[in-house]
Image: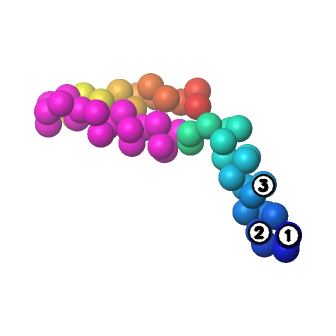
Amino acid sequence: MNNKRLANVFGRISGILQGPSRQQIETEYLNRSLSIHDLERRQREIDAGKFSSF
């Protein structure tokens, strides 16, 4: 296996073990909003630190 391919494999394994990033979690949370009002509320929650522990 060449170094580039090996690095790619380790990168994928690392990504699986680490789980989703904070940005991915926030984006998924916003994408599940049901209306513009729900979206705005969720944005305020994120701004207030809803996912700050991630």
In this rendering, the label closer to the viewer, 1 or 3: 1
In space, the residues marked 2 and 3 are separated at their CA atoms by 9 Å
Residue 2, magenta (yes or no): no
Residue contact at pointers 2 and 3, CB within 8 angstroms: no
- The segment highlighted magenta reads 22-39
User: Which quarter of the image is occupied by the C terminus?
Assistant: top right
The residue at 66%/42% (across/down) is 16
25 horizontally vs 43: left or right = right
The residue at 40%/28% (across/down) is 48
**Which residue is disc 1 drawn over?**
1
Q: Residue furthest front?
A: 1
Question: Mark 1: which amino acid?
Answer: Met
Observer able to see residue 44? no
Above or below — where is 24 with respect to 51?
below
Question: Mark 2: which amino acid?
Answer: Arg
The tag earlier along the polypeptide, 1 or 3, is 1
On residue 33, which mark appears? none
